[in-house]
Image (cartoon, grey):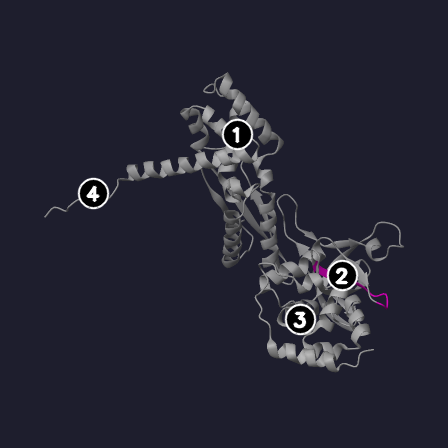
């Protein structure tokens, strides 16, 4: 018995033509969006002939691929996590005027290929473009030459770097990346690749209070053409009265990493890595307590999370622990002690030594405490609500316990 042919089934050639048409339609729409963000009337593209438009639209492209460089070690689950997060960011965020609807994924695909094609045609003065059409190509090429499409993707690069820092652990391994964008198109196909690198931890031992301690180099992996590097700080940031350039390498003790894990409990583990290490790698903020002891602030933008006290030995800084904001041995904690006369044991009992305290207590029930937190400059923390913070609910019993404590406190 002969088999009846399925009239719905399309031959490979038909499917390919349909796929190509979908691709070209998408490329056409996206190209006009790109021209819009560059300040052109998008209809300028229609002044080219169908064949000339096809020269720009035929190049196949796809989302950036993440690939581990041979000889480097990045676990597959971490590669997938970074890849999924970055792809989601590119799909859901727009460049320029959101009403135009140009996503970063559009820029990383059709935008990159258009940039390469337009500059190639401009440089070679393609004969298929007569003088009138070449004026259009030249005008677009001039804009792309001033501000190449890859430059518009800097925010995506920052997003990659952020997630690379999230999966890095200075006490185990840190990771880096290089986003390679081809400058030319080969065989009608263009894709960009994010290459991932790894760097093993660096360990040293130091003596402190007659005991031997283990510490890890605070460092970052490669970022594009910048090689891996270790965090350091000019000693004049800590000692303004001193002269001469001298840099101190920054290390962090295992104990400090443990305290970070316990006290920065408002973030998932991988995101805690980012928020904990970022202020040690980049913009250092040094403060001193009443005794003159210096410490790093652990912060993000204008939100303070805690403090890193340290000791200096020769040309090395060793971070000893991570202190919560409310610790009596910190600038903010000292103000709370003066205001309420509470001590370290009280703060531990109340749960004030963890960041989750600020998101599980209904401060409207404790106006005296709420007012004090605002007065000492913690308004940003109390209202801290980024998308990557863990969700918290108000703990009614905890709020009641803290309310009774402050109602019965023997205030100075």
Camera-side mark, 4 or 2 = 4
Q: Position of residue 310 (x, y in %)?
A: 78, 65
* Cα distance between the residues tagged 2 and 1: 51 Å
Q: Cβ–Cβ below 8 Å for labels 3 and 2?
A: no
Camera-side mark, 3 or 1 = 3
Q: Which residue is mark 3?
A: 364
Residue segment shown in magenta: 290-299
Q: Is residue 19 left or right of residue 153?
A: left
Q: Is residue 318 at all visible to an observer of this figure? A: yes
Asked if the stretch drawn in magenta spans residue 297, the answer is yes
Residue in the picture at 59% in, 62% down: 389
Q: Secondary structure at mark 4?
A: loop
Q: Which residue is mark 2?
A: 296
Camera-side mark, 3 or 2 = 3
* Cα distance between the residues tagged 3 and 2: 31 Å
Q: Position of residue 328 (x, y in %)?
A: 78, 72
Q: Which residue is mark 1?
A: 41
Q: Secondary structure at mark 3?
A: helix
Q: Secondary structure at mark 2?
A: strand
Work out whether mark 4 precedes mark 1 in sequence or the reverse, and give the earlier one. Answer: 4
Q: Position of residue 125 (x, y in %)?
A: 52, 20
Asked if 193 appears above or below 163 in the picture, the reply is above
Q: Is residue 1 left or right of residue 14?
A: left
Asked if the stretch drawn in magenta spans residue 263, the answer is no
Report the disc number at residue 7.
4
């Amino acid at each position: 018995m002969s088999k009846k042919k399925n009239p719905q089934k399309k031959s490979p050639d038909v499917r390919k033509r349909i796929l190509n048409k979908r691709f070209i339609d998408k490329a056409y729409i996206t190209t006009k969006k790109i021209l819009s963000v560059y300040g052109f009337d998008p209809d300028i593209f229609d002044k080219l002939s169908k064949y000339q438009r096809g020269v720009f639209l035929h190049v196949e492209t796809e989302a950036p691929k993440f690939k581990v460089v041979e000889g480097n070690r990045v676990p597959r689950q971490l590669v997938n996590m970074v890849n999924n997060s970055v792809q989601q960011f590119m799909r859901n965020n727009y460049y320029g005027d959101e009403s135009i609807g140009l996503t970063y994924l559009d820029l990383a695909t059709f935008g990159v290929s258009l940039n390469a094609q337009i500059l190639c045609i401009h440089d070679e003065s393609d004969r298929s473009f007569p003088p009138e059409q070449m004026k259009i190509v030249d005008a677009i090429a001039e804009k792309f030459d001033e501000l190449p499409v890859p430059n518009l993707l800097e925010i995506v690069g920052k997003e990659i770097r952020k997630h690379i820092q999230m999966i890095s652990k200075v006490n185990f391994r840190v990771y880096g990346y290089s986003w390679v964008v081809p400058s030319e198109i080969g065989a009608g196909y263009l894709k960009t690749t994010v290459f991932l690198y790894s760097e093993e931890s660096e360990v040293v031992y130091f003596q402190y209070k007659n005991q031997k301690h283990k510490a890890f180099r605070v460092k970052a992996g490669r970022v594009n053409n910048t090689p891996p590097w270790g965090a350091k700080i000019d000693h004049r940031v800590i000692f303004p009265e001193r002269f001469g350039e001298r840099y101190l390498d920054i290390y962090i003790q295992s104990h400090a990493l443990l305290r970070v894990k316990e006290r920065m409990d408002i973030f998932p583990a991988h995101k805690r890595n980012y928020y904990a290490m970022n202020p040690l790698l980049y913009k250092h903020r040094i403060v001193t307590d009443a005794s003159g002891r210096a410490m790093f602030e652990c912060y993000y933008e204008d939100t303070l999370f805690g403090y890193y006290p340290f000791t200096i030995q020769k040309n090395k800084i060793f971070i000893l622990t991570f202190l919560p904001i409310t610790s009596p041995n910190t600038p903010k904690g000292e103000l709370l002690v003066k205001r309420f006369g509470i001590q370290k044991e009280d703060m531990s009992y109340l749960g004030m030594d963890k960041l989750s305290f600020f998101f599980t207590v209904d401060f409207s029930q404790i106006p005296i405490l709420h007012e004090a937190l605002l007065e000492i400059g913690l308004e940003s923390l109390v209202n801290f609500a980024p998308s990557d913070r863990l969700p918290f609910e108000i703990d009614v019993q905890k709020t009641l316990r803290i309310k009774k404590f402050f109602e019965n406190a023997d205030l100075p």
